[in-house]
């Protein structure tokens, strides 16, 4: 288990929440609201028709409104993670976070509601009054014991699932992890001895579920602030804790943990000591799940035990036992059968399904989350990771089936296999795209990447993020004093990043020789070259890459694209038989679209367009996608005629004469035809078997305008343009790029799309 953890500064956490738009969620309409007719239908008078229908039959709200796919995340902020009672509004970042996870992982629409009230009766009344708006209610971070009453009464009063995630979501995941950890250590649930630190919402619910799965109540010792909850205790007791009293002489957590097989922490940071861990049975199972900081860190546990199976609630250690693995999928299954409740059977089905999934071979996205090492069911992989793309189609069918079997499904699913296939399509196929690149980069030995504009605050933040995400070793070019001043400004620890001052570098004579040799016959004098190496950070950085002192470079934040490109071209050649192009990637719900050439040749010839397609196809295939090229034009198959359209058509015709064309291509073709899956009806002779994924643009203006349009119209991410076709892996970012844009481009520099070794390592699943 790695003890190194990616980290981020407080400033980064705040900037993430603030930029480019405050918060983490927004809403999108699902109907066009373009015309007078749309307005008439969506609002008055058209809206009256569904209103009257729902007034007669309430169930029709599932058909005519977004109710059936909407879950409210509701909190009063009295137990925010393990941070305590910090008030309703302070809980909003967590609640928005839960909503965004609902959407990202299970395509459930969700928004957060913070209720500024601690009186359970008032909260119950408030939620009851608004409850029918939603298909389900996810209660979150409401402290015990009030949370029990609130959930129980709302379940009675509402006929939709009401689910307190800290209780049941947590219990489901902990149970799944425990089933597998017991299997790995050869234990039987009915024999294990369990100590639980924390007898609140999460702790009591975990105790309830693992008891349901076979652990005898007498084997579960619950502890709160006052120690063991034993039979006869009167201090700080309530009816919920009373259900777990045990006849025992043990009084403290330390005594409860002594000799235990399992320790589950659902309390606060620091509640568990090394001595406690030392006193546990052989091969102990230790889930320290307090957030954001566990009861004891995995590093501390490892100092005293090498035989422990360790899990935390955090994403930066292996075995993340966190309710994010549960709530999106349990609600997905419940909503899809219009369940009136989430019952015990549905929870058990979810826990068992999660446990089973962890035993199967993992796809590449999971390897990426494990920083390149492909995990196998075992001590460091007892539970799936949140980025596992199989979760969405694997878990909800079990939940839905359990709902149907227990009579709470109001709309049973007839064909479970078809349902599972539909689920797979709900997940945004591009969601894991960048993550997979990162995984590919992490699998390699760390690359040294030059950040040429090292004095810039955004570059410093990007370099630090690049390092802490374990994507490689960043090198900042700049004056040390100035870089350090800006590091302090953005909160990056000063000794974290390597800084090289181009003027003071010992390697300059070598760079000078290299560059002079290349440029002496093109009019550059010795002193020009010397000045360039000393003063121009792009030239200096590129020389570092050319002479083997770095593996790649990123630049462009402060200078326009062509200036940066001109500097780089002094040092780097075009690859043999290729010429440089810019390829942008438009990441949308329909998957990635690769667009070339978006940055270099203004009016490519037919030959150049053909070359572009071949280079793009090669790189796209290495990235794991089967290339399908469209030579785009304003014309389709010859109509209408035009000067550019003719060049495009010639390019497509030239492909028949090229040796290295082992992919589908078509052209001249208009973009709507290239992307429309029904095009074959109109053009049955088309050579494309599916929508094109590489768009070769007729000219740079069309390329630049269309990618920038896509980037600015919303619901897409545009990465790039990636610089392809040069001998050195150097990438140019756009002026004013965000920190994550810069990290992405540095990652592509490290990935080096031309490096042949990488192609087969990550195939699309
Ligand atoms: N990984 C995951 O998925 C999840 C993790 N959690 C974490 O579990 C923890 C508890 O959450 P939740 O149950 O919702 O909160 P609650 O407020 O309902 O319960 C907290 C419990 O912790 C106990 N406690 C507090 N301080 C100590 C201490 N110093 N030593 C021992 N016990 C202590 C409290 O004792 P008392 O009863 O005496 O007040 C109470 O029983 C949080 O850290 C939360 O982040 C929660 C949900 C999911
Ligand atoms: C994960 C979670 O819900 C919590 O820590 O409260
Ligand atoms: Mg919580």
Image: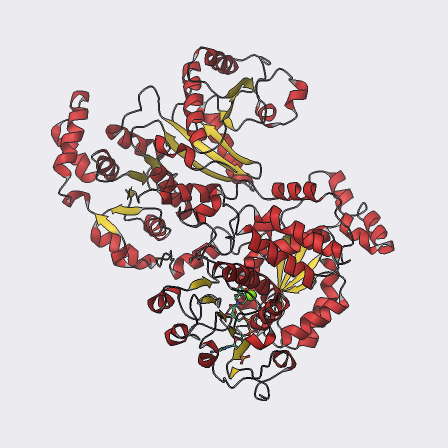
Nearer to us in this view, 175 or 187: 187
Q: Quadrant of residue 34?
A: top right
> Is 546 rendered above or below residue 200?
above
Q: Quadrant of residue 597?
A: top left
Report whether 37 appears left or right of 671. right
Q: Quadrant of residue 715?
A: top right
Nearer to us in this view, 604 or 411: 411
Residue 696 in percent (x, y) is at 48, 24
Report whether 575 appears left or right of 82. left
Residue 276 in percent (x, y) is at 41, 75
Residue under the point 40% across and 72% down: 277
Report whether 341 appears left or right of 112. right
Q: Is residue 101 visible?
A: no
Residue under the point 19% across and 39% down: 535
Report whether 142 appears left or right of 563. right
> Is 515 rendered above or below residue 370?
above
> Is 607 rendered above or below residue 545?
above
Residue under the point 84% across and 47% down: 49
Nearer to us in this view, 87 or 436: 436
Q: Quadrant of the N terminus?
A: bottom left
> Is 106 rendered above or below residue 574?
below
Residue 440 in percent (x, y) is at 40, 41
Residue 499 in percent (x, y) is at 23, 49
């Amino acid at each position: 288990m790695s003890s190194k953890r990616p980290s981020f500064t407080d400033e980064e956490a705040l900037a993430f929440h603030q930029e480019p738009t405050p918060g983490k969620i927004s809403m999108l309409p699902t109907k066009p609201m373009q015309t007078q007719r749309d307005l008439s239908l969506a609002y008055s008078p058209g809206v009256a028709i569904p209103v009257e229908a729902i007034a007669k039959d309430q169930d029709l709200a599932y058909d005519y409104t977004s109710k059936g796919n909407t879950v409210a995340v509701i909190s009063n902020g009295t137990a925010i993670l393990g941070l305590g009672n910090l008030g309703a509004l302070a809980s909003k970042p967590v609640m928005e976070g839960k909503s965004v996870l609902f959407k990202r992982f299970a395509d459930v629409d969700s928004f957060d509601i913070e209720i500024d009230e601690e009186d359970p009766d008032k909260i119950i009344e408030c939620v009851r009054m608004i409850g029918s708006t939603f298909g389900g209610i996810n209660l979150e971070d409401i402290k015990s014991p009030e949370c029990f009453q609130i959930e129980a009464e709302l379940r009675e009063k509402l006929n939709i699932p009401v689910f307190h995630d800290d209780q049941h979501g947590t219990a489901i995941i902990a149970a799944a992890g425990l089933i597998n950890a017991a299997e790995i250590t050869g234990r039987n649930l009915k024999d294990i001895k369990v100590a639980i630190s924390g007898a609140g919402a999460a702790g009591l619910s975990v105790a309830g579920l693992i008891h349901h799965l076979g652990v005898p109540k007498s084997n579960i010792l619950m502890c709160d602030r006052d120690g063991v909850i034993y039979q006869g205790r009167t201090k700080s007791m309530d009816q919920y804790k009373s259900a777990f009293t045990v006849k025992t002489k043990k009084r403290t957590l330390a005594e409860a943990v002594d000799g235990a097989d399992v320790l589950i922490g659902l309390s606060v940071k620091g509640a568990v000591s090394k001595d406690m861990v030392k006193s546990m049975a052989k091969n102990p199972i230790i889930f320290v799940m307090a957030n954001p900081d566990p009861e004891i860190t995995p590093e501390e546990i490892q100092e005293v035990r090498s035989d422990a199976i360790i899990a935390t609630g955090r994403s930066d250690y292996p075995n993340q036992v966190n309710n994010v693995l549960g709530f999106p999928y349990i609600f997905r299954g419940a909503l899809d059968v219009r369940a009136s409740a989430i019952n015990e059977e549905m929870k058990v089905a979810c826990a068992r399904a999660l446990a089973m999934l962890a035993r199967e071979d993992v796809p590449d996205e999971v390897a990426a989350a494990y920083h390149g090492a492909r995990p196998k069911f075992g001590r460091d992989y007892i539970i799936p990771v949140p980025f596992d793309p199989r979760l969405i189609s694997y878990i909800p069918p079990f939940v839905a089936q359990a709902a149907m079997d227990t009579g709470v499904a109001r709309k049973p699913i007839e064909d479970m296999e078809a349902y599972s296939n539909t689920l797979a399509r709900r997940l945004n196929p591009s969601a894991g795209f960048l993550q997979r690149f990162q995984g590919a980069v992490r699998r390699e030995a760390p690359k040294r990447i030059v950040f040429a504009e090292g004095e810039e605050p955004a570059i410093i933040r990007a370099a630090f993020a690049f390092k802490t995400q374990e994507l490689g070793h960043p090198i900042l070019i700049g004056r040390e004093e100035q870089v350090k001043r800006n590091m302090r400004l953005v909160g990056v620890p000063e000794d974290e990043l390597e800084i090289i001052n181009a003027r003071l570098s010992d390697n300059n004579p070598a760079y000078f020789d290299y560059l002079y040799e290349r440029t002496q016959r093109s009019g550059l004098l010795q002193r020009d070259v010397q000045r360039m190496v000393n003063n121009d950070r792009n030239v200096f950085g590129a020389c570092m890459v050319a002479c083997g002192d770095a593996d790649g470079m990123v630049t462009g934040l402060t200078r326009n694209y062509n200036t940066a490109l001109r500097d780089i071209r002094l040092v780097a050649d075009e690859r043999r038989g290729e010429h440089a192009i810019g390829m942008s990637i438009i990441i949308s719900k329909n998957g990635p679209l690769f667009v070339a050439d978006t940055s270099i040749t203004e009016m490519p010839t037919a030959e150049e367009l053909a070359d572009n397609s071949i280079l793009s196809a090669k790189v796209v295939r290495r990235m794991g996608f089967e290339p399908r090229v469209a030579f785009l034009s304003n014309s389709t198959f010859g109509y209408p005629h035009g000067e550019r359209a003719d060049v495009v058509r010639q390019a497509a015709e030239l492909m028949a004469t090229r040796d290295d064309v082992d992919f589908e291509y078509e052209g001249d073709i208009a973009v709507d035809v290239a992307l429309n899956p029904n095009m074959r009806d109109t053009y049955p002779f088309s050579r494309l078997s599916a929508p094109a994924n590489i768009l070769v643009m007729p000219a740079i203006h069309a390329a630049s305008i269309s990618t920038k349009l896509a980037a600015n119209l919303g619901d897409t991410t545009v990465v790039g343009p990636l610089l392809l076709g040069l001998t050195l892996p150097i990438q140019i970012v756009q002026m004013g790029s965000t920190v994550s844009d810069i990290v992405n481009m540095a990652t592509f520099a490290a990935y080096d799309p031309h490096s042949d070794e990488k192609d087969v390592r990550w195939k699309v699943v």
